[in-house]
Image (cartoon, grey):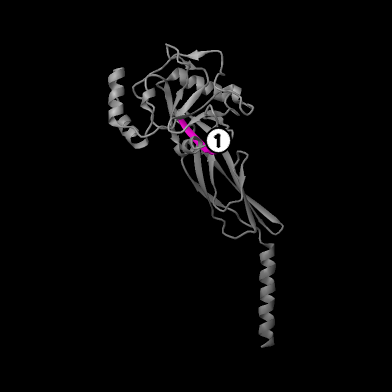
Amino acid sequence: MKSNVFLNYAMLLLMAALSACAVPKPSFTYAGPEEAPSPISFKNTSPKPADSYVWDFGDGNTSTEAAPVHTFFASGSYAVKLTAKKGSKTKTYEDKISIKAPKVCLVMIETDFGNMLVRLSDATPKHRDNFLKLAEQGYFDGTLFHRVISGFMIQGGDPNSKNAKPGQQLGMGGPNYTIEAEFVDSLAHIKGAIAAAHTGNPQKRSSGSQFYIVHGSPVSDAQLNEREGSYNFRYSKAQRDAYAKLGGYPPLDREYTVFGQVIQGLDVIDKIAAQPTLPGNRPKSDVKMKVRVIK
């Protein structure tokens, strides 16, 4: 009996020693869309448990989550690493992930309330190219959504709003040029539409930088019929369906140039539109933005 007890004890000591000497063997799998912005889901498939794991996504971001979802905002090849630590020993597993550039023109508007992914329209090339140029320059970064009206829109792009003092009047800043209006049948002021502001000039030329995103309210067929009659154009069935489902603000159609649409993050518009405002419709707490081109 004593010999069996001793043998069992010795086996336990041996197993503990072998476990202490074992080197972790990390591995993982992943899945997700190939085009940026690409949210990739990672799964830790390491065969032996370790004390801790650290993910390095190859774009300057890391995570210690068990099964992270990480979004790659730019095309390219990323060396993703999973490092496992057990005791004093570490081991790293690496795999390459290739992300392709999107086939359409996309920008991400980042705020403290979440991000809005915007598809810019090829049907309005002057506005598209101008917005891309300014975004690449970092022109919008740190500017505010300085005019917010629930049921209508959220407006930004005034360079004077960077580090603006409380109570400072905003809405008059911009580059020293305007853009020719680009009205197209395929674009309307449906919720999430991004459009250029202007000062009410007869040519309806757009501000060089100020833009708004439609929040809107419910829209009836009667409103659309009236707009068609007044401006001699026709809404498509898809536009009527979108107005019925999402709402919008058709009184602005053919008055201001729509040049894109929010395709992810409509709830962010709701959150910003719900912020308390001061006289002049500036939010009491600053709503800053950063705009990045997805490429």
Whether residue 111 appears in magenta in the rendering, the answer is yes
In percent of width and height, residue 272 lies at 51, 36
| Relative height, residue 278 to residue 79 (above, below) | above
For the residue pair 162 and 236, the one nearer the viewer reads as: 162
Taking the image as shown, residue 88 lies to the left or right of residue 153, namely: right
Q: Which residues are magenta?
A: 110-118
Extreme bottom residue here? 1
| Relative height, residue 159 to residue 245 (above, below) | above
Residue identifier under label 1: 111
Q: Is residue 99 visible?
A: no
Extreme right residue here? 88
| Residue 229 location, quadrant | top left
Secondary structure mostly taken by the magenta-highlighted segment of the chain = strand
| Relative height, residue 167 to residue 40 (above, below) | above
Residue type pointed to by label 1: Thr
In percent of width and height, residue 43 lies at 52, 52
The residue drawn where x is 60% and y is 29% is: 142
Quarter of the picture holding the N terminus = bottom right
In percent of width and height, residue 162 lies at 62, 26
The residue drawn where x is 68% and y is 69% is: 16
Extreme front residue here? 279
The residue drawn where x is 66% and y is 79% is: 8
In percent of width and height, residue 141 lies at 59, 28
Taking the image as shown, residue 159 lies to the left or right of residue 262, namely: right
Q: How many marks?
A: 1
For the residue pair 47 and 51, the one nearer the viewer reads as: 51
Q: Is residue 14 visible?
A: yes
